[in-house]
Image: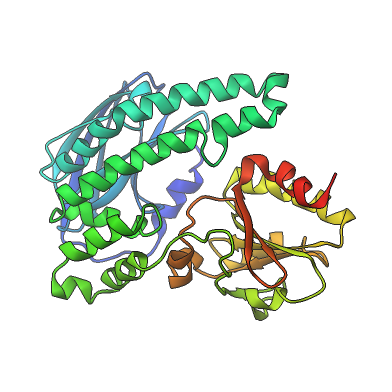
Amino acid sequence: MKKLTTLALLLTTTLQVFAGEIKITANLTGFTDTAVVYLLSGQTPIAYQTLAQGKVELTAEVSETPDTYAIYVVENNQPYYTMLFVANETIEITAAKDDFPYQVKVNGSKHHNIKAQLDELQMPIHKKGEALKQEITALQQTAEWLKIEVQEKYVGTNGLANQLTKELKQVEADFILNNFDNAYTWTLLPYNTTAFDKTFYKAVYNKMTTEQKQTALGKKYLLASQSQRLTKGDAFIDINLLDKDLKAEKLSDYFNKDKEYVLVDLSSVSCPSSRQAFEITQELTKNTEKLQVVSVLQSPDVATYQQFGAYSTNNWSIVYAEDFTRTDTYIQYQENVTPTFLLFDKSGKLIDRWTGAIHQQKLEQYLGK
């Protein structure tokens, strides 16, 4: 008898009250019969089945209200996924392995169609992104990648990767404003309060009804319409933090002291670039008294954070901002890339900002080699 996977064991979680049932038939080619197909609600599997001759049938209790789910295929520890926007329906999914995540066909759903329209609009940009990813991977195997100007070209703040991200988000912004009263569009809104500029936020807020403006989401869009990314000379915005011992403190506690610079590092425990930058920060802070680094860590829970917080030193504090991405402060900063580095003088005025690719070179510019 095969052992149950971790995802399968999670199916024993607390039962909820549902109003309907979804039935999914998936025809998947290119996978072996060892592949396991899961239907996820959030990160919780609500149905799973091993693929048999390229076919699987999944049934689960769901709400009558359409919501976002994921089809998640695991083959030889390699994940493949696609997102669905469905309710209690009978649907058919058709895909080859290479169709994941954006070219999976979904038939029979009266709700998923609007998501498919956005996927189709963004598909040309996704294809450019895949080609760029392959180009970067090949470059990283050569000495050429060590040149700072090459890294800037591809993954710098204004590099090719970020340009494609901006193109994707612009398509999404236009889609949101053109399909505002659709239920799927409203699932996108909570993730877009730091992705654009005041013009977009104001346009969204103005499309809301009086009742919608009074909701928590409406208030976040109002705040976003009044916020903008810090520029040189702007003062830092205070953040409520927990130190490595989980004692309350504030970002302001680190200013107006004996350090010439304060570097605020907005990072995430799940971001590979953040973790790579930690190594650079750790090495460079060993040999300088000019710099105080405050790594504000986005973490799913306190226990995960504490594994990183333990590495704090005298001039490098790894702190925890609980639920930071859901706070008003997060919206006020308008920074949605990790890691983002904000370099302030000791009084709290912004000197410079950058993202992860050029972290070492930027710090050496101010601290010396």
The structure residue drawn at horizontal position 52% and vertical position 61%, both measured from the top left corner, is: 230
Q: Nearer the viewer, residue 301 or 313?
A: 313
The structure residue drawn at horizontal position 45% and vertical position 21%, both measured from the top left corner, is: 131
Query: Is there any visible trace of residue 204 in the rendered image?
Result: yes
Q: Quadrant of residue 97?
A: top left
Quarter of the picture containing the C terminus is: top right
- Whole-percent x, y for residue 102 in the image: 32, 31
Q: How many marks?
A: 0
Q: Quadrant of residue 291?
A: bottom right
Q: Is residue 155 above or below residue 202?
A: above
Q: Quadrant of residue 140?
A: top right
The structure residue drawn at horizontal position 39% and vertical position 22%, both measured from the top left corner, is: 31
Left or right: 175 as drawn, with respect to 29: left
- Whole-percent x, y for residue 265 in the image: 64, 58
- Whole-percent x, y for residue 321 in the image: 57, 69
Left or right: 18 as drawn, with respect to 278: left
